Image: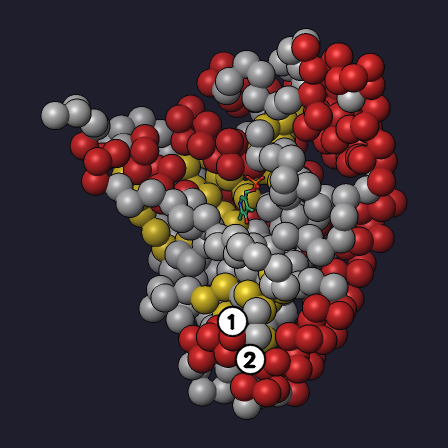
Amino acid sequence: MLNLRKNIKDMAGYVPGFQPEGEGWTKLNSNENPYPPSPKVVEAIIAELVDGGGNLRKYPDAGSKKSRKIAADLYGYDPSWVIMANGSDELLNNLIRAFAGEEDEIGYVNPSYSYYGPLAEIQGAKIRTFGLTEDHRIADFPEIYEGKIFFLTSPNAPLGCCFSNAYIEELAPRCKGILVVDEAYVDFAAENAMELVHKYENLVVTRTFSKSYSLAGMRIGLAVARPEIVAALDKIRDHYHLDRLALVAAEAALLDQDYLRMTLKKVCDTREWFSAELRKLGFQVDPSGANYIFAIPEDRNAKRIYEGLYAEKILVRYFSDPLLQHGVRISIGTHEEMALTLKAISAIG
Ligand SMILES: *Cc1c(COP(=O)(O)O)cnc(C)c1O
């Protein structure tokens, strides 16, 4: 028999969001950005392919020095505080590998990003989850949390609520291990915790290019943390984790903040309009700082909404988890896509 490690044999594995086959779907289930990336990103990728793609013969810069410098300048840090990654998922994985051994505990809020659990299981780490109170604080968070890592998804996925910097400043000193603020969606929010990394030595902020920068297909993320933490993550990662096209895409995307602001405004405006329209239809929609909303129908029968939209080839996210089964998570697409969705929801009645 194969001698798989017991934790690997026992674990279910992460199931990524459904990617439908065929034409004609309105895809609002994976929080992808409806707008293309900056034209400068496309130009940079094409430029990297000059001379019949001759550059691709050569390994990429293993240290992603250029993009680290650009990100460091943008966020007000020395480059030694920044690491790039093959998607922010890589960072979450390597943070666990760096800080939590077998049987060590990691914690996070339930509901939040459903990938922390499988990553902890792969490592053989123990998991402790905490609920949320009505006013969006962590329920029963201990005076001192002894676990090796606490992941705080802010804005929360899939609820969209944000944890304030004041609250994060309360939590950081109460974490004996590191506090990772997963800011995958923070560009769509009013506040972010980036500047707090200067102040709290156990704080790590992770970001992704998959949502706000419209680059889910390129697999790019980054983290800001103390140089000691960045150095540890550099030891663990694959040497050439970012390919040449991803590196030039990251650089161009970070440099085009005007384009980012323009698409963010479109998505956020659409989010506010769509939320207000859904409330008129009787849905409960709490304010969201992300590019999705969590919508609760009056009769709390969210599965019916999911299925009704599916029949119209509109794909949203339904979670069978008892904590979430009363609502659907709807990614914010273009104004036209959301108008179509509203019409389909009205027709469900
Ligand atoms: C999308 C997402 C990620 C992963 O981002 P990638 O850069 O695509 O790996 C991490 N955390 C949360 C909360 C996300 O929603």
Give the spatial CA distance, label 1 vs label 2: 21 Å
The mark nearer the N terminus, 1 or 2, is 2
Q: Quadrant of residue 123?
A: top left
Measuring from the top left, give residue 179's x and y in whole percent: 49, 39
Q: In this view of the protein, which residue sits in the foreground, 51 or 47? A: 51
Residue 170 is labelled as none
Q: How many labels does the image show?
A: 2
Secondary structure category for the residue under label 1: helix
Measuring from the top left, give residue 250's x and y in whole percent: 73, 31
Q: Quadrant of the C terminus?
A: bottom right
Measuring from the top left, give residue 344's x and y in whole percent: 61, 80
Nearer to us of marks 1 and 2 is 1
In the depicted structure, whether residue 21 falls above or below residue 205: below
The residue that appears at 61% across and 63% down in the rendered structure is 25
- Residue that badge 1 annotates: 310
The residue that appears at 65% across and 11% down in the rendered structure is 59
Q: Quadrant of residue 183?
A: top right
- Residue that badge 2 annotates: 284
* Pointer 2 residue Cβ closer than 8 Å to ligand 1: no
The residue that appears at 53% across and 55% down in the rendered structure is 21
> Which residue lies most toward the right here?
258
Q: In which quarter of the image is ligand 1?
A: top right
Amino acid under disc 1:
Tyr
Amino acid under disc 2:
Gln
The residue that appears at 80% across and 61% down in the rendered structure is 266
Measuring from the top left, give residue 100's x and y in whole percent: 35, 29
